Amino acid sequence: MKELNSIFASIGSTVLLAINSGRYLKTLPRQFPRFIDQCYSIGYTTLPIVTILSFFIGSVLALQSGYSMQNFGAKQLIGTLVGMSMVRELGPVMVAILLAGRVGSAIAAELASMKVYQEIDALVTMNIPPERMLVMPRLVAVVFMMPVLASIANLCGWFGGALVCKYTGFISVEPDAYFAALKRYMEAKDVWDGLIKADVFGFVVILVSCNIGLNTRGGPREIGAAVTKAVVVSLVLILVLDYFVTKALV
Amino acid sequence: MAGTTAPFAKKTFGVTIEKLCKSFARVPVLKDVSLEVKPGEIFVIMGPSGSGKSVLLRHIAGLELPTSGRVRIGDFDPSDPATRQQIRLAMVFQAGALFNSLTVYDNLALYLREHRLGSEGQIRERVMHALQILSLEKAALQFPAALSGGMKKRVAIARALVTGPQLLLYDEPTSELDPVMSATITEVIAALRDQTSVTTIVVSHDRDLALSIADRMAIIIDGRIRATGVIADFAHPADPDIANFLKPTIDLKNPRFKQLENDHE
Protein backbone atom coordinates (compact mmCIF):
# COMPACT_ATOMS: atom_id res chain seq x y z
CA MET A 1 0.00 0.00 0.00
CA LYS A 2 2.83 2.35 0.92
CA GLU A 3 4.56 1.60 -2.40
CA LEU A 4 1.35 2.22 -4.31
CA ASN A 5 0.92 5.58 -2.58
CA SER A 6 4.50 6.43 -3.44
CA ILE A 7 3.94 5.59 -7.14
CA PHE A 8 0.78 7.75 -7.31
CA ALA A 9 2.57 10.57 -5.47
CA SER A 10 5.42 10.40 -8.01
CA ILE A 11 2.99 10.47 -10.94
CA GLY A 12 1.18 13.43 -9.36
CA SER A 13 4.34 15.41 -8.72
CA THR A 14 5.58 14.71 -12.27
CA VAL A 15 2.33 15.97 -13.81
CA LEU A 16 2.40 19.02 -11.53
CA LEU A 17 5.99 19.73 -12.56
CA ALA A 18 4.96 19.62 -16.23
CA ILE A 19 2.04 22.00 -15.60
CA ASN A 20 4.10 24.40 -13.48
CA SER A 21 6.90 24.41 -16.05
CA GLY A 22 4.40 25.04 -18.84
CA ARG A 23 3.23 28.15 -17.01
CA TYR A 24 6.69 29.66 -17.52
CA LEU A 25 6.78 28.98 -21.26
CA LYS A 26 6.21 32.67 -21.96
CA THR A 27 9.50 33.47 -20.20
CA LEU A 28 11.45 31.43 -22.78
CA PRO A 29 12.97 34.51 -24.47
CA ARG A 30 14.56 35.44 -21.11
CA GLN A 31 15.79 31.88 -20.65
CA PHE A 32 17.13 31.69 -24.20
CA PRO A 33 20.82 31.22 -23.23
CA ARG A 34 19.82 28.31 -20.97
CA PHE A 35 17.68 26.87 -23.78
CA ILE A 36 20.68 26.98 -26.14
CA ASP A 37 22.89 25.35 -23.47
CA GLN A 38 20.37 22.54 -23.12
CA CYS A 39 20.07 22.11 -26.89
CA TYR A 40 23.85 21.70 -26.95
CA SER A 41 23.78 19.24 -24.06
CA ILE A 42 20.84 17.19 -25.33
CA GLY A 43 21.58 17.40 -29.04
CA TYR A 44 25.21 17.99 -29.87
CA THR A 45 26.82 15.95 -27.10
CA THR A 46 24.48 12.99 -27.71
CA LEU A 47 25.01 13.05 -31.48
CA PRO A 48 28.24 10.95 -31.75
CA ILE A 49 26.86 8.01 -29.80
CA VAL A 50 23.51 8.21 -31.63
CA THR A 51 25.33 8.17 -34.97
CA ILE A 52 27.53 5.19 -34.13
CA LEU A 53 24.84 3.07 -32.50
CA SER A 54 22.15 3.72 -35.10
CA PHE A 55 24.60 2.89 -37.90
CA PHE A 56 25.31 -0.49 -36.35
CA ILE A 57 21.67 -1.15 -35.47
CA GLY A 58 20.76 -0.57 -39.14
CA SER A 59 23.65 -2.80 -40.17
CA VAL A 60 22.74 -5.69 -37.91
CA LEU A 61 19.08 -5.37 -38.86
CA ALA A 62 20.01 -5.71 -42.54
CA LEU A 63 22.30 -8.62 -41.74
CA GLN A 64 19.68 -10.53 -39.74
CA SER A 65 16.87 -9.86 -42.17
CA GLY A 66 19.12 -10.75 -45.15
CA TYR A 67 20.01 -14.03 -43.43
CA SER A 68 16.33 -14.88 -42.83
CA MET A 69 14.91 -13.56 -46.11
CA GLN A 70 17.37 -15.24 -48.44
CA ASN A 71 15.40 -18.47 -47.94
CA PHE A 72 12.24 -16.80 -49.26
CA GLY A 73 13.84 -14.91 -52.12
CA ALA A 74 12.69 -11.67 -50.54
CA LYS A 75 16.08 -9.94 -50.24
CA GLN A 76 14.85 -7.03 -52.35
CA LEU A 77 12.57 -6.07 -49.45
CA ILE A 78 15.39 -5.65 -46.93
CA GLY A 79 15.41 -1.89 -47.62
CA THR A 80 11.72 -1.71 -46.74
CA LEU A 81 12.20 -3.66 -43.54
CA VAL A 82 15.22 -1.68 -42.34
CA GLY A 83 13.69 1.63 -43.36
CA MET A 84 10.35 1.08 -41.66
CA SER A 85 11.88 -0.48 -38.54
CA MET A 86 14.28 2.39 -38.06
CA VAL A 87 11.73 5.14 -38.72
CA ARG A 88 8.78 3.76 -36.79
CA GLU A 89 10.47 1.94 -33.93
CA LEU A 90 14.20 1.59 -33.50
CA GLY A 91 15.20 5.19 -34.22
CA PRO A 92 12.91 6.85 -31.63
CA VAL A 93 13.28 4.14 -28.99
CA MET A 94 17.05 3.90 -29.27
CA VAL A 95 17.55 7.67 -29.17
CA ALA A 96 15.26 7.87 -26.12
CA ILE A 97 17.21 5.12 -24.34
CA LEU A 98 20.49 6.90 -25.09
CA LEU A 99 18.95 10.15 -23.87
CA ALA A 100 17.91 8.49 -20.58
CA GLY A 101 21.36 7.04 -20.02
CA ARG A 102 23.38 10.03 -21.05
CA VAL A 103 21.34 13.20 -20.45
CA GLY A 104 18.59 12.06 -18.05
CA SER A 105 21.13 10.67 -15.60
CA ALA A 106 23.20 13.87 -15.76
CA ILE A 107 20.12 16.02 -15.17
CA ALA A 108 19.00 13.89 -12.21
CA ALA A 109 22.51 14.08 -10.70
CA GLU A 110 22.76 17.86 -11.19
CA LEU A 111 19.34 18.68 -9.76
CA ALA A 112 19.66 16.16 -6.92
CA SER A 113 23.00 17.71 -6.00
CA MET A 114 21.46 21.19 -6.10
CA LYS A 115 18.65 19.97 -3.87
CA VAL A 116 20.89 18.23 -1.34
CA TYR A 117 23.24 21.21 -1.11
CA GLN A 118 20.29 23.63 -0.69
CA GLU A 119 20.85 25.48 -3.99
CA ILE A 120 17.18 24.82 -4.88
CA ASP A 121 16.14 26.27 -1.49
CA ALA A 122 18.29 29.30 -2.22
CA LEU A 123 16.44 29.80 -5.53
CA VAL A 124 13.08 29.56 -3.76
CA THR A 125 14.07 32.17 -1.16
CA MET A 126 15.10 34.45 -4.04
CA ASN A 127 11.64 34.04 -5.61
CA ILE A 128 13.20 32.30 -8.62
CA PRO A 129 11.02 29.27 -9.42
CA PRO A 130 13.23 26.24 -10.17
CA GLU A 131 10.68 25.18 -12.81
CA ARG A 132 11.34 28.39 -14.73
CA MET A 133 15.11 28.30 -14.62
CA LEU A 134 15.94 24.60 -14.49
CA VAL A 135 13.07 22.59 -15.97
CA MET A 136 11.28 24.60 -18.67
CA PRO A 137 14.39 25.29 -20.84
CA ARG A 138 15.28 21.58 -20.72
CA LEU A 139 11.79 20.48 -21.74
CA VAL A 140 11.64 22.92 -24.65
CA ALA A 141 15.15 21.94 -25.75
CA VAL A 142 14.31 18.23 -25.80
CA VAL A 143 11.16 18.86 -27.85
CA PHE A 144 13.34 20.67 -30.41
CA MET A 145 16.26 18.24 -30.40
CA MET A 146 14.59 14.81 -30.31
CA PRO A 147 13.22 14.96 -33.89
CA VAL A 148 16.66 16.06 -35.08
CA LEU A 149 18.39 13.20 -33.26
CA ALA A 150 15.78 10.66 -34.38
CA SER A 151 16.11 11.82 -38.01
CA ILE A 152 19.89 11.49 -37.89
CA ALA A 153 19.52 8.05 -36.28
CA ASN A 154 17.18 7.00 -39.11
CA LEU A 155 19.60 8.17 -41.80
CA CYS A 156 22.57 6.45 -40.16
CA GLY A 157 20.60 3.23 -39.75
CA TRP A 158 19.51 3.29 -43.39
CA PHE A 159 23.08 3.84 -44.61
CA GLY A 160 24.41 1.13 -42.29
CA GLY A 161 21.86 -1.27 -43.77
CA ALA A 162 22.72 -0.23 -47.33
CA LEU A 163 26.44 -0.86 -46.78
CA VAL A 164 25.80 -4.31 -45.30
CA CYS A 165 23.47 -5.21 -48.16
CA LYS A 166 26.07 -4.24 -50.75
CA TYR A 167 29.16 -5.79 -49.20
CA THR A 168 27.76 -8.95 -47.59
CA GLY A 169 28.20 -11.90 -49.95
CA PHE A 170 24.99 -13.78 -49.27
CA ILE A 171 22.83 -10.60 -49.53
CA SER A 172 24.38 -8.58 -52.39
CA VAL A 173 21.62 -6.02 -52.83
CA GLU A 174 22.77 -2.85 -54.60
CA PRO A 175 22.11 0.51 -52.85
CA ASP A 176 19.81 1.62 -55.69
CA ALA A 177 17.56 -1.39 -55.15
CA TYR A 178 17.82 -1.08 -51.37
CA PHE A 179 16.74 2.60 -51.31
CA ALA A 180 14.06 2.01 -53.96
CA ALA A 181 12.51 -0.65 -51.72
CA LEU A 182 12.90 1.65 -48.73
CA LYS A 183 10.95 4.41 -50.47
CA ARG A 184 8.34 2.18 -52.07
CA TYR A 185 6.29 1.42 -48.96
CA MET A 186 7.24 4.34 -46.75
CA GLU A 187 4.89 7.29 -46.38
CA ALA A 188 5.33 10.67 -44.78
CA LYS A 189 3.04 9.50 -41.97
CA ASP A 190 5.56 6.82 -40.99
CA VAL A 191 8.26 9.43 -40.59
CA TRP A 192 5.98 11.78 -38.66
CA ASP A 193 4.79 8.99 -36.36
CA GLY A 194 8.40 8.16 -35.52
CA LEU A 195 9.26 11.79 -34.82
CA ILE A 196 6.18 12.18 -32.60
CA LYS A 197 7.20 9.09 -30.66
CA ALA A 198 10.72 10.45 -30.25
CA ASP A 199 9.34 13.72 -28.92
CA VAL A 200 7.00 11.99 -26.45
CA PHE A 201 9.78 9.73 -25.15
CA GLY A 202 12.29 12.59 -24.88
CA PHE A 203 9.82 14.83 -23.05
CA VAL A 204 8.98 12.07 -20.57
CA VAL A 205 12.64 11.18 -19.96
CA ILE A 206 13.63 14.78 -19.18
CA LEU A 207 10.50 15.45 -17.12
CA VAL A 208 10.98 12.32 -15.00
CA SER A 209 14.69 13.02 -14.52
CA CYS A 210 13.98 16.61 -13.44
CA ASN A 211 11.24 15.49 -11.05
CA ILE A 212 13.37 12.81 -9.42
CA GLY A 213 16.29 15.22 -9.08
CA LEU A 214 14.16 17.98 -7.56
CA ASN A 215 12.50 15.61 -5.09
CA THR A 216 15.73 14.17 -3.73
CA ARG A 217 15.94 14.26 0.05
CA GLY A 218 18.79 13.35 2.34
CA GLY A 219 22.53 13.43 1.87
CA PRO A 220 25.06 12.88 -0.92
CA ARG A 221 24.26 9.15 -1.04
CA GLU A 222 20.79 10.00 -2.31
CA ILE A 223 22.28 11.68 -5.38
CA GLY A 224 23.48 8.30 -6.69
CA ALA A 225 20.14 6.73 -5.83
CA ALA A 226 18.34 9.52 -7.73
CA VAL A 227 20.44 8.87 -10.85
CA THR A 228 19.71 5.14 -10.77
CA LYS A 229 16.02 5.77 -10.20
CA ALA A 230 15.84 8.31 -13.05
CA VAL A 231 17.42 5.90 -15.54
CA VAL A 232 15.37 2.87 -14.48
CA VAL A 233 12.05 4.74 -14.43
CA SER A 234 12.84 6.36 -17.79
CA LEU A 235 13.66 3.03 -19.44
CA VAL A 236 10.49 1.40 -18.12
CA LEU A 237 8.37 4.36 -19.21
CA ILE A 238 9.91 4.42 -22.71
CA LEU A 239 9.02 0.79 -23.33
CA VAL A 240 5.55 1.01 -21.78
CA LEU A 241 4.74 4.24 -23.61
CA ASP A 242 6.09 2.75 -26.83
CA TYR A 243 3.20 0.32 -26.94
CA PHE A 244 0.51 2.88 -26.14
CA VAL A 245 1.84 5.63 -28.41
CA THR A 246 2.29 3.17 -31.27
CA LYS A 247 -1.25 1.88 -30.73
CA ALA A 248 -2.58 5.43 -30.77
CA LEU A 249 -0.71 6.28 -33.97
CA VAL A 250 -1.44 3.20 -36.11
CA MET B 1 34.19 45.68 5.99
CA ALA B 2 34.17 48.74 3.80
CA GLY B 3 32.23 51.64 5.23
CA THR B 4 29.71 51.91 2.43
CA THR B 5 25.96 51.86 2.67
CA ALA B 6 24.41 48.52 1.85
CA PRO B 7 21.72 48.42 -0.85
CA PHE B 8 18.86 47.51 1.47
CA ALA B 9 15.20 48.28 1.00
CA LYS B 10 13.80 50.96 3.32
CA LYS B 11 10.75 48.88 4.22
CA THR B 12 11.33 46.04 6.64
CA PHE B 13 9.00 43.44 8.13
CA GLY B 14 8.32 41.93 11.54
CA VAL B 15 7.70 38.20 11.89
CA THR B 16 4.89 36.55 13.85
CA ILE B 17 4.83 32.85 14.62
CA GLU B 18 1.69 31.43 16.23
CA LYS B 19 1.43 27.96 17.77
CA LEU B 20 3.71 26.44 15.13
CA CYS B 21 4.01 22.64 15.18
CA LYS B 22 5.97 20.52 12.75
CA SER B 23 6.41 16.77 12.57
CA PHE B 24 8.51 14.71 10.19
CA ALA B 25 7.23 11.13 9.77
CA ARG B 26 5.10 11.63 12.90
CA VAL B 27 8.16 12.69 14.93
CA PRO B 28 7.46 16.13 16.42
CA VAL B 29 10.28 18.58 15.75
CA LEU B 30 8.61 21.88 16.64
CA LYS B 31 6.07 21.96 19.46
CA ASP B 32 3.69 24.89 19.83
CA VAL B 33 6.26 27.56 18.96
CA SER B 34 5.09 31.17 19.26
CA LEU B 35 7.37 34.15 18.70
CA GLU B 36 7.21 37.76 17.66
CA VAL B 37 10.15 39.46 15.97
CA LYS B 38 9.81 43.23 15.79
CA PRO B 39 10.72 45.18 12.65
CA GLY B 40 14.35 46.29 12.62
CA GLU B 41 15.68 44.14 15.45
CA ILE B 42 18.30 41.42 15.50
CA PHE B 43 16.62 38.38 16.96
CA VAL B 44 18.80 35.39 17.78
CA ILE B 45 17.33 31.91 18.16
CA MET B 46 19.71 29.76 20.18
CA GLY B 47 19.55 26.12 21.08
CA PRO B 48 21.58 22.95 21.17
CA SER B 49 22.09 20.82 18.03
CA GLY B 50 18.90 19.04 16.99
CA SER B 51 16.61 21.36 18.93
CA GLY B 52 14.68 22.42 15.80
CA LYS B 53 16.05 25.92 15.32
CA SER B 54 17.01 25.47 11.64
CA VAL B 55 13.60 23.91 10.92
CA LEU B 56 12.02 26.96 12.55
CA LEU B 57 14.10 29.25 10.31
CA ARG B 58 13.08 27.23 7.23
CA HIS B 59 9.43 27.85 8.15
CA ILE B 60 10.10 31.57 8.34
CA ALA B 61 11.76 31.36 4.91
CA GLY B 62 8.72 29.51 3.53
CA LEU B 63 10.74 26.39 2.75
CA GLU B 64 8.61 24.14 4.98
CA LEU B 65 4.86 23.89 5.47
CA PRO B 66 3.68 23.82 9.11
CA THR B 67 1.86 20.75 10.42
CA SER B 68 -0.26 23.26 12.33
CA GLY B 69 0.01 26.89 13.37
CA ARG B 70 1.14 29.73 11.15
CA VAL B 71 4.00 32.03 10.23
CA ARG B 72 3.49 35.58 9.00
CA ILE B 73 6.03 38.05 7.64
CA GLY B 74 4.18 41.32 8.01
CA ASP B 75 0.78 40.23 6.70
CA PHE B 76 2.18 37.70 4.23
CA ASP B 77 2.37 33.92 4.38
CA PRO B 78 5.94 33.03 3.31
CA SER B 79 4.99 29.49 2.25
CA ASP B 80 2.40 30.73 -0.26
CA PRO B 81 4.13 31.25 -3.63
CA ALA B 82 1.58 33.93 -4.56
CA THR B 83 2.17 36.14 -1.51
CA ARG B 84 5.89 35.48 -1.02
CA GLN B 85 6.53 37.52 -4.18
CA GLN B 86 5.56 40.55 -2.07
CA ILE B 87 8.48 40.03 0.31
CA ARG B 88 12.18 40.41 -0.47
CA LEU B 89 13.56 37.83 1.88
CA ALA B 90 17.18 36.70 1.88
CA MET B 91 18.59 33.69 3.65
CA VAL B 92 22.23 32.87 4.35
CA PHE B 93 22.37 29.07 4.50
CA GLN B 94 24.62 27.15 6.88
CA ALA B 95 26.75 25.71 4.06
CA GLY B 96 26.39 28.82 1.88
CA ALA B 97 24.24 27.09 -0.79
CA LEU B 98 26.19 28.92 -3.48
CA PHE B 99 25.54 27.88 -7.08
CA ASN B 100 28.61 25.80 -7.82
CA SER B 101 28.29 26.13 -11.59
CA LEU B 102 28.42 29.95 -11.40
CA THR B 103 31.25 32.31 -10.52
CA VAL B 104 30.98 34.47 -7.40
CA TYR B 105 29.97 37.41 -9.61
CA ASP B 106 27.25 35.39 -11.37
CA ASN B 107 26.00 34.03 -8.02
CA LEU B 108 25.34 37.61 -6.96
CA ALA B 109 24.01 38.76 -10.32
CA LEU B 110 21.54 35.87 -10.69
CA TYR B 111 18.77 37.44 -8.59
CA LEU B 112 19.05 40.79 -10.36
CA ARG B 113 19.11 39.22 -13.82
CA GLU B 114 16.20 36.85 -13.16
CA HIS B 115 14.05 39.70 -11.81
CA ARG B 116 15.34 42.11 -14.49
CA LEU B 117 16.40 44.71 -11.95
CA GLY B 118 18.41 46.96 -14.22
CA SER B 119 20.72 46.87 -17.20
CA GLU B 120 23.88 44.74 -17.17
CA GLY B 121 25.84 47.89 -16.24
CA GLN B 122 23.57 48.63 -13.28
CA ILE B 123 23.71 44.99 -12.19
CA ARG B 124 27.50 45.10 -12.34
CA GLU B 125 27.50 48.21 -10.17
CA ARG B 126 25.26 46.60 -7.53
CA VAL B 127 27.18 43.34 -7.52
CA MET B 128 30.57 45.04 -7.20
CA HIS B 129 29.15 47.24 -4.44
CA ALA B 130 28.04 44.19 -2.46
CA LEU B 131 31.37 42.46 -3.08
CA GLN B 132 33.19 45.58 -1.92
CA ILE B 133 31.18 45.69 1.31
CA LEU B 134 32.29 42.13 2.10
CA SER B 135 35.87 42.74 0.78
CA LEU B 136 35.41 40.12 -1.93
CA GLU B 137 36.26 42.08 -5.09
CA LYS B 138 39.24 39.85 -5.91
CA ALA B 139 37.12 36.69 -5.69
CA ALA B 140 34.55 37.90 -8.25
CA LEU B 141 35.64 35.57 -11.02
CA GLN B 142 36.34 32.54 -8.86
CA PHE B 143 34.05 29.54 -8.56
CA PRO B 144 32.70 28.62 -5.10
CA ALA B 145 34.71 25.37 -5.03
CA ALA B 146 37.93 27.44 -4.95
CA LEU B 147 36.88 29.45 -1.86
CA SER B 148 37.58 28.85 1.82
CA GLY B 149 34.70 28.26 4.26
CA GLY B 150 34.89 31.84 5.54
CA MET B 151 34.87 33.29 2.04
CA LYS B 152 31.88 31.15 1.08
CA LYS B 153 29.98 32.53 4.07
CA ARG B 154 30.90 36.09 3.04
CA VAL B 155 29.82 35.42 -0.56
CA ALA B 156 26.52 34.02 0.76
CA ILE B 157 26.03 37.22 2.80
CA ALA B 158 26.92 39.35 -0.24
CA ARG B 159 24.40 37.39 -2.32
CA ALA B 160 21.76 38.07 0.32
CA LEU B 161 22.78 41.73 0.45
CA VAL B 162 22.50 42.32 -3.30
CA THR B 163 18.80 41.41 -3.25
CA GLY B 164 18.04 44.48 -1.10
CA PRO B 165 16.28 42.33 1.50
CA GLN B 166 13.42 43.41 3.73
CA LEU B 167 14.10 40.46 6.03
CA LEU B 168 17.48 38.77 6.50
CA LEU B 169 17.80 35.23 7.84
CA TYR B 170 21.07 33.60 8.89
CA ASP B 171 21.36 29.86 9.56
CA GLU B 172 24.41 29.14 11.76
CA PRO B 173 26.51 31.90 10.21
CA THR B 174 29.61 31.12 12.28
CA SER B 175 29.55 27.33 12.26
CA GLU B 176 32.70 25.57 11.01
CA LEU B 177 34.68 28.83 11.12
CA ASP B 178 37.78 29.65 13.12
CA PRO B 179 37.40 32.24 15.95
CA VAL B 180 38.84 35.10 13.87
CA MET B 181 36.51 34.46 10.93
CA SER B 182 33.58 33.98 13.35
CA ALA B 183 34.30 37.39 14.83
CA THR B 184 34.47 38.91 11.34
CA ILE B 185 31.12 37.43 10.32
CA THR B 186 29.58 38.60 13.61
CA GLU B 187 30.85 42.13 12.92
CA VAL B 188 29.42 41.99 9.39
CA ILE B 189 25.95 41.00 10.65
CA ALA B 190 25.96 43.74 13.28
CA ALA B 191 27.29 46.39 10.90
CA LEU B 192 24.69 45.57 8.24
CA ARG B 193 21.92 45.97 10.78
CA ASP B 194 23.39 49.24 12.08
CA GLN B 195 23.53 50.64 8.54
CA THR B 196 20.14 49.49 7.37
CA SER B 197 17.80 48.60 10.27
CA VAL B 198 16.66 45.51 8.37
CA THR B 199 14.95 42.86 10.51
CA THR B 200 17.53 40.14 11.08
CA ILE B 201 16.91 36.65 12.46
CA VAL B 202 19.95 34.59 13.34
CA VAL B 203 19.87 30.91 14.25
CA SER B 204 22.98 29.81 16.06
CA HIS B 205 24.44 27.84 18.93
CA ASP B 206 27.33 30.32 19.13
CA ARG B 207 26.90 32.03 22.51
CA ASP B 208 29.49 34.73 21.75
CA LEU B 209 27.70 35.72 18.55
CA ALA B 210 24.34 35.91 20.31
CA LEU B 211 25.61 37.97 23.22
CA SER B 212 27.46 40.34 20.86
CA ILE B 213 24.67 41.24 18.46
CA ALA B 214 21.24 40.19 19.72
CA ASP B 215 18.61 42.79 20.57
CA ARG B 216 16.47 39.94 21.79
CA MET B 217 16.98 36.23 22.01
CA ALA B 218 14.96 33.02 22.30
CA ILE B 219 16.17 29.67 23.56
CA ILE B 220 14.71 26.60 21.90
CA ILE B 221 15.26 23.20 23.48
CA ASP B 222 13.71 19.97 22.20
CA GLY B 223 11.40 21.85 19.80
CA ARG B 224 9.94 24.21 22.43
CA ILE B 225 10.69 27.86 23.07
CA ARG B 226 11.88 27.83 26.68
CA ALA B 227 12.62 31.53 27.12
CA THR B 228 12.51 34.81 25.23
CA GLY B 229 13.95 38.16 26.25
CA VAL B 230 16.72 40.71 26.01
CA ILE B 231 20.29 39.62 26.72
CA ALA B 232 20.13 40.84 30.35
CA ASP B 233 17.26 38.41 31.01
CA PHE B 234 19.66 35.52 30.40
CA ALA B 235 22.36 36.64 32.87
CA HIS B 236 21.11 34.31 35.62
CA PRO B 237 18.66 31.84 34.07
CA ALA B 238 16.45 29.96 36.51
CA ASP B 239 15.84 27.10 34.08
CA PRO B 240 18.68 24.58 34.65
CA ASP B 241 18.61 23.43 30.98
CA ILE B 242 19.08 27.01 29.77
CA ALA B 243 21.78 27.63 32.38
CA ASN B 244 23.57 24.48 31.29
CA PHE B 245 23.31 25.45 27.61
CA LEU B 246 24.53 29.03 28.11
CA LYS B 247 27.24 28.23 30.66
CA PRO B 248 28.35 24.66 30.09
CA THR B 249 30.92 23.32 32.50
CA ILE B 250 33.30 20.45 31.98
CA ASP B 251 33.60 18.28 35.06
CA LEU B 252 36.66 16.08 34.69
CA LYS B 253 35.61 14.16 37.81
CA ASN B 254 32.42 13.09 36.08
CA PRO B 255 32.09 9.29 36.49
CA ARG B 256 31.71 8.95 32.70
CA PHE B 257 35.28 10.18 32.14
CA LYS B 258 36.49 7.77 34.81
CA GLN B 259 34.74 4.94 32.96
CA LEU B 260 36.47 5.95 29.69
CA GLU B 261 39.81 5.92 31.48
CA ASN B 262 39.18 2.39 32.77
CA ASP B 263 38.09 1.21 29.31
CA HIS B 264 41.30 2.60 27.85
CA GLU B 265 43.45 0.73 30.34
Image (cartoon, rainbow, N blue to C red):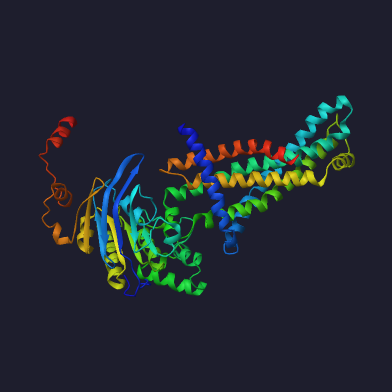
| Residue in front for this viewpoint, B134 or A94 | A94
In this view of the protein, can residue B94 be seen by the observer?
A: no
Q: In this view, does B184 lie to the left or right of B84?
A: left
Residue at left 25%, top 58%? B44
Q: Is residue A215 left or right of residue A93?
A: left
| Residue in front for this viewpoint, B209 or A206 | A206
Residue B17, x across and y down, in percent: 30, 56
- Vertical order, B139 against B79 (above or below): below
Residue B168, x across and y down, in percent: 34, 63
**Quarter of the figure with residue A23:** bottom right
- Vertical order, B103 against B19 (above or below): below
Count up the numbered dots.
0
Q: Is residue B255 left or right of residue B179?
A: left
| Residue in front for this viewpoint, B204 or A22 | A22
In this view of the protein, can residue B76 be seen by the observer?
A: yes
Residue A192, x across and y down, in percent: 76, 47
Q: In which quarter of the image is the C terminus of chain A?
A: top right
Residue at left 79%, top 37%? A82
**Quarter of the figure with residue A201:** top right
Residue B158, x across and y down, in percent: 38, 65
Q: Which residue lies furthest to the top in this view?
A: A71
